[in-house]
């Protein structure tokens, strides 16, 4: 049995959404199952997560069509987490711009911190797939692929979680980032996928 009242939590979160995104913000009935999964995960509600086949040790891969609300939901989830589930939201596009400026240090920054003594952080990499392969002094690098591979190492060694939002399917992720990345992601994230027919809410 869960100790949480999910209808009340969803109403509370919707009010947070109205405050952050305007009075027209509201949850659609068809999205409630995805929202429930996310809330259960970030509350570490073991009973509900067990029912929904969600592994609390892993991160979240939230996928779905453009405009279905992935970024908005992950932004709102920062109101919910238990202490060890708190995370930083970082657009992949911004990481790509950082790479152009400072180069390979960026990969280290999002896997091992700014220095060797830095605390590892839970990150949500937003909109995976929108960034492109970039060049730094003529060397091309698939920045997010390298970051994900590095994040896998700290997931295994230190249980640090990585969350991702993306419009890409699993096959498209493999095409863009390689089979090693797809394989690692399978081990380090829970997939929550919006229906492909979900309409653009923007």
Image (spheres, helix red, strand yellow):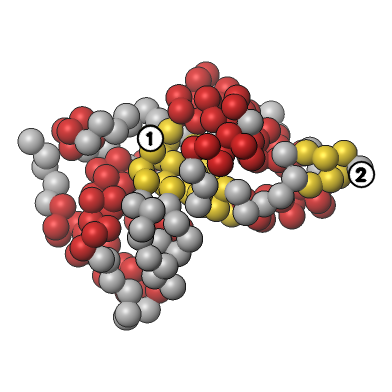
Decide if residue 181 is on the left or right side of residue 12. Answer: right
Considering only vertical position in the picture, is 123 above or below 118? below
The answer to whether residue 46 shows anywhere in this view is no
User: In the picture, which quadrant includes the N terminus?
Assistant: top left
Residue 129 in percent (x, y) is at 60, 49
Decide if residue 123 is on the left or right side of residue 61. Answer: right
Residue 38 in percent (x, y) is at 31, 47
Q: Mark 1 or mark 2: which comes first in sequence?
A: 2
> Which residue is rendered at x = 25% and y = 31% of the image?
53
How much space separates mark 1 and mark 2, taking CA atoms? 36 Å
Residue placed under numbered mark 1 in the picture: 190
- Residue 41, which numbered label? none
As rendered, which of 122 and 184 lies closer to the eye? 184
Local crowd size for mark 1, using a 10 Å CA cut-off: few (<14), some (14–19), many (≥20): many
> Which residue is rendered at x = 28% and y = 53% of the image?
35
Residue placed under numbered mark 2 in the picture: 137
Residue 191 in percent (x, y) is at 38, 38
Q: Quadrant of residue 187?
A: top left
The answer to whether residue 70 shows anywhere in this view is yes
- Residue extending farthest top: 157
Q: Quadrant of residue 54?
A: top left
Considering only vertical position in the picture, is 31 above or below 141? below
What SS does tag 1 mark? strand
As rendered, which of 26 and 81 lies closer to the eye? 26
What SS does tag 2 mark? loop
> Which residue is rendered at x = 54% and y = 30% of the image?
182
Marks 1 and 2: CB-CB under 8 Å? Answer: no
């Amino acid at each position: 049995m869960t100790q949480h009242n999910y209808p009340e939590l969803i109403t509370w979160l919707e009010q947070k959404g109205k405050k952050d995104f305007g009075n027209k913000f509201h949850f659609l009935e068809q999205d409630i199952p995805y929202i429930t999964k996310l809330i259960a995960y970030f509350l570490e509600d073991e009973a509900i997560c067990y029912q929904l086949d969600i592994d609390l040790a892993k991160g979240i891969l939230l996928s779905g069509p453009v405009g279905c609300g992935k970024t908005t939901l992950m932004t709102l989830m920062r109101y919910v987490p238990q202490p060890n589930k708190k995370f930083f939201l970082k657009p992949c596009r911004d990481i790509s711009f950082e790479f152009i400026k400072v180069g390979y240090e960026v990969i280290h920054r999002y896997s091992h911190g700014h220095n060797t003594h830095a605390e590892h952080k839970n990150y949500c990499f937003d909109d995976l797939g929108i960034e492109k392969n970039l060049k730094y002094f003529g060397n091309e690098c698939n920045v997010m692929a390298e970051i994900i591979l590095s994040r896998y190492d700290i997931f295994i060694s230190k249980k640090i979680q990585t969350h991702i939002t993306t419009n890409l399917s699993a096959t498209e992720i493999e095409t863009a980032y390689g089979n090693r990345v797809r394989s690692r992601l399978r081990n380090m994230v829970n997939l929550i996928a919006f229906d492909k027919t979900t309409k653009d809410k923007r």
